[in-house]
Image (tube, rainbow, N blue to C red):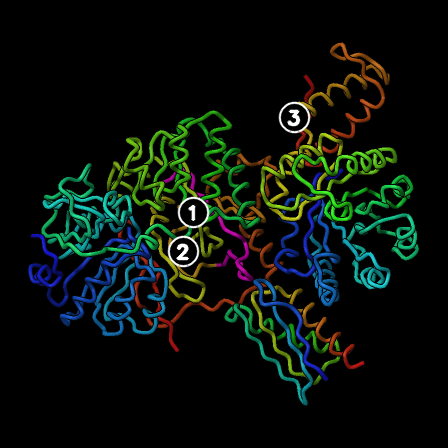
Amino acid sequence: MKTVSVGTLESSDCLVTIKPHESLEIEIDTVVHDAFYEHISDLVRKTLKEHGITKAYVIVQDKGALDYAIKARLTTAIKRMRDDNG
Amino acid sequence: MISKSLETLLDFVKPSDGMACSFHHHFRNGDNVLNMVMEALMDRDLTNLELYPSGIFPVHTSLIRALKENRIRNLTTNYISGPFADALNTYGLTGELTMQTHGGRARAIIEGENAIDVAFIAVSACDEKGNATGLEGDNVCGSLGYAIEDAIHAKKTILITDTIQTTITNPQIRSKWVDGILHVPSIGDPRGIVSGTLSITKDPLGLKIARDTIRFLDESGMIEKDVSFQSGAGGISLAITKMFTETLEEKGLSASFFTGGITKHHVNALEKGLVKDLYDVQCFDLDAIRSLRENPRHHFMSASDYANPNNDHRKIKDLSIVILGAAEVDLDFNVNVTTDSSGTIIGGSGGHSDTAEDAALSIIVSPLLKGRMPLIKDRVTSITTPGQSVDVIITERGIAINPKRHDLLERFKNTTLPLMSIESLQKKAHALSGVPKHSPAKGRVIGHIESRHGQKGDALYRKEG
Amino acid sequence: MARSYLFIPGNVPRMLQNMDVYEADVIIIDWEDAIAPGEKDEARILSETFLKKHAPDVEIYIRINAEPSLYEADLAHIPLNHVKGVVYPKSDTASLSKLLKVLPDSLDIIALIETPGAFFDIKTIAAMERISALFLGAEDLCSELGATRDPSGDAILFARSTLIMAAKAYGKDAVDTPWADLDANNLQKDAARAKNLGFDAKSAIHPNQVPLINRLFSPGAEQIKDAKRIIAMHERKGTMRFSLDGKMVDKPIIQRAYKLLEKARRYGLDGGDSVD
């Protein structure tokens, strides 16, 4: 299984990296840590759950992306990971 | 006395522990003088210094050394940019930080609250008697407006220059105020002197804010004969200055005066006859310097003549319109340009709260979202300019008029501009960003913001951990 | 009816989330040229998620990819409640007929005319029911022709006039090609030329081009005044043929006056109902 990265490190975007892992690990590095860290963390967990992901290593490098962008990047990453693994 | 040796000059000044020194920031990030003097004072092992730099820039690394070595007791300034703010956080002060306004600093010097022992004043040229200017010499900065009260009221005034000439035309600083002259090889780096935030924004959101601001001014009925105007040197402000003068041209009008920091856009307006006079406390670029030197309608003014609230002849008393920026605003129209939302110092009033209070119409222009952070808080992290002085907030997604301005609300009843309450504007931002978690700045109090009238305002904190 | 069409890349959050403040009458989210082959899925999902969540208050089209294998995936990601139609690249009769078989009913098509061949099909294309506008794509056309564009527009004069002729013959909007650099003087020349030839609107590739285009393609104050007088006279006389200021007014002029006034009202340029 491969590592998949989606998005960019431009302002208002985020780079989401997902790779197979034996448990669910989430790393979030965000420029709006004080104001939105917990919010982003909840959003990432919720989105993973919607897609039935219970095990993966997920890294979100956030440059001030709004929820829709974080969700879209993560969704694309999950789809690509699944497509890659047939 | 004139000397080429800083040591000789310091012997003359007889510096001591607890001495109060002032500096000005006209050489901005190209200034060598503050560092030169501070290093020498520290090498003499002086402590408990009282410092009054009118502004602190990234180049001023000697101040970081002074914090590290615990040599500063109180620090009073109008503006801090760059790593010094982080150093303040790390090392603290034994005394207090006071963030004044440009007008408030002038007032406090004149009235004796800022009691300065020695004013170290960098000038681009002077004569042997001590008549000085920022307009001649190798390292010109233009107006020396923020240094004038220091020169007049300090116990000792020392000029520091790299150019001594036989005569100075129209000196900004008079020899009778001057006690000594230090002649050094170089006072600064021209590349850092006229630099910074000087190009008109190309950002589509910034330009939209500028266009809507011009429409707002037009519909307010204030773009009329003899209007007066001030705006800063930020990208959006510059776009507004340019569009404002274009509007004057289209309407066949001329303004009476522009005040504040002057740029080539102000100068263009003067040269086209679109404004009668420029009153210049600070030159932001070489065109401004050239114009101040050559054009009799481009006038030098001191910080007190600019913005001192107790000076009845201050220019901004007659100002019609001022355009200002914001790091944060809140539901009461308070504006913060001093700290970021975590409490770290990122600037300071400068002339912000002076002009907001005095101008007939004060407009704040800013993007509604900065990255993901909404501009409008329930309460700003620290109040630089009280909402009482702020009339309108203009963003790319809407315009809010301060409810105390009944007259404006009435006038804009039928406008097609996107007018809304500040609460609605905040909701619009939150619909995009989500509601940020409010984590108020806390820690040990390191100082205060001071109003232009000298009242103690919001506390500034040294963050813990 | 629109004056300006602004392309924004479908994979840039900063631009997507500000699409409604760029002042363009129509936003075209680009999933074609602006998106690298390996990033099509990113752009589709990002745009779709944005539109569903934030429903921006602006008319939106999506420039889909020309190849059926790609546009089928594109169509699956278009949120129909938020999108008015698609901009279809390299249009010709055959490819459009194929697209129409799979295009959801609610979407109309703006046909990008950007190949020499399309100009031989243009009458058929303009006549297609679900085509709402013809859109000139001069960059691709010029590279196929080996022509060089400049602000005079000489190289594309025939293409522009042919497209306008076909669009107007079938009551469709004619939308001009973007000007590719950010020099405002060049844009001004290029856009003024297009406006004089009869284009209803012009496209932009940067938000900073939009205000100039809107200004240029808005009905002017004099035009609005004339249109109001023509309509007032028409309504008073109840006839389709009369003389005003010594000039004959007949049906096409009256219709044009109505259309102009509708556009003026839509963009808030109508200064009220007074006729003097």
Q: Nearer the viewer, residue C27 or B160?
A: B160
Give the Cα distance between marks 1 and 2.
Answer: 10 Å
Instruction: Determine whether the residue tagged by mark 1 lies in a helix, strand or loop.
Output: strand
Give the Cα distance between marks 1 and 3.
Answer: 34 Å
Say if labels 1 and 3 share a chain: no
Q: Nearer the viewer, mark 1 or mark 3?
A: 3
In the image, residue C222 sits, relative to residue B227, either above or below, namely above
- Image quadrant holding the N terminus of chain C, namely top right
Question: Which residue is disc 3 drawn over?
Answer: C221
Q: Which mark is residue C196?
A: none
Instruction: Determine whether the residue tagged by mark 2 lies in a helix, strand or loop.
Output: loop
Where does the magenta region start and end?
B359-378
* Residue shown at the point (50%, 70%) measured from the top left: A34
Question: Which residue is disc 2 drawn over?
Answer: B337
* Residue shown at the point (26%, 40%) measured from the top left: B301
Residue C69, position as x, y percentages in the image: 85, 63
Amino acid type at mark 2: Val
| Label 2 chain ID | B
Amino acid type at mark 1: Leu
Q: Do tag 1 and tag 2 residues touch (Cβ < 8 Å)?
A: yes
Amino acid type at mark 3: Ala
Q: Nearer the viewer, residue A64 or B326?
A: A64
Question: Which residue is disc 1 drawn over?
Answer: B324
- Image quadrant holding the C terminus of chain C, namely top right
In the image, residue B180 sits, relative to residue B357, either above or below, namely below
Decide whether residue B265 is among the magenta residues: no
Within 10 Å of disc 2 (Cα), the crowding (few <14, some 14-19, many 20+) is many
